[in-house]
Amino acid sequence: MSDQILKPGLTSISVIVGIDIGHKVIKISKENGAIGCTALICRGTVTNKWLELLDLNEDRRELIFILCENHVARCILEALNRKLKFEKPNHGIAFSTEIAEVRGMHSLKDALEEAKVNYRMGEDLDLCKPEKEGEKMYHSIYVVVDKGKANDVVSIAKKAGARGGTIFNARGSGIHETSKLFSMEVEPEKEVVLILTEAKLTDAVAGAIVDGMELEKPGNGVLYIQNVSMTYGIY
């Protein structure tokens, strides 16, 4: 039986915050209409020169993916911004991307109904504002490479104009990503780098990563780019 394909007008919100803040993000999001949330432990890179000299230019972060309907996305982002104060340096960043379709989420209808109840009961309904005029356009760049190469990706991206990136672990299973040990296939560990860039810098940053990491060669990695709808905490 094939998966049911749904095109329900959903948005994915990504929030990157300090360690142990993720539970607050999830609570606020659900109070304001989120359908579901997933949290990952990752590490961020910073550009403070003094920290780089001390080899302390990485810190642990939490990356939270939030699923919601389009019309409550800004409400959730505004609520998060008000309580977590993304406008202050190092308080985190948040951005949203539109989802084209959903497959395999058979309980989506029930989840939507529950989210609507939470949305109506939420204390931050007044924060659902129209989109801001004159916002800068951003893209999110995702790069999947073998474990140990993520820092190289970030270094190349910075030289091309990016401010840094967020790194989290994954596991590969593509046709070029498996090796054999005692006749058994082994899936190597991967690292995923998330980079947020202004749209005008995207081509330069992505091109530099593709060339520097030789992504055109099979098995060296994958890069893809998404349009970003709204951003908070970007300076």
Image (spheres, rainbow, N blue to C red):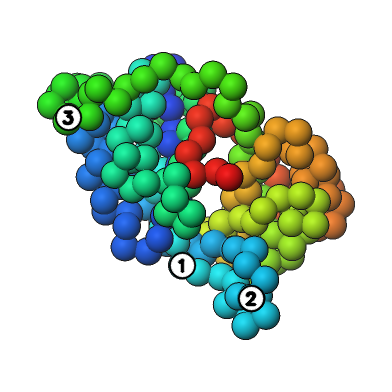
Question: For this view, does 210 lie left or right of residue 3?
Answer: right
Q: Earlier in the sequence, mark 2 or mark 3?
A: 2
Mark 2 or 3: in front is 2
Q: Residue 122 has which mark?
A: 3
Question: For this view, does 211 lie left or right of residue 32?
Answer: right
Mark 1 or 2: in front is 2
157 or 179, nearer to the observer:
157
Residue holding disc 1: 60
Q: Residues within 10 Å of mark 1 (few under 14, many from 20)?
A: some
Question: For this view, does 116 lie left or right of residue 234?
Answer: left
Amino acid tagged 3:
Gly
Q: Are marks 1 and 3 in contact (CB under 8 Å)?
A: no
In three-dimensional space, the C-alpha distance between marks 1 and 3, rounded to whole angstroms, equals 30 Å
Give the residue drawn at x 74%, y 54%: 157
Give the residue drawn at x 29%, y 44%: 83
Q: Residues within 10 Å of mark 2 (few under 14, many from 20)?
A: few
5 or 39, nearer to the observer:
39
For the N terminus, the quadrant is top left
Residue 59 at x, y percent in the picture: 50, 69
Tag 3 secondary structure? loop
Q: Residue 50 has which mark?
A: 2
The relative height of residue 90 versus residue 34 in the rendered view (above or below) is below
Give the residue drawn at x 36%, y 20%: 129
Tag 1 secondary structure? strand
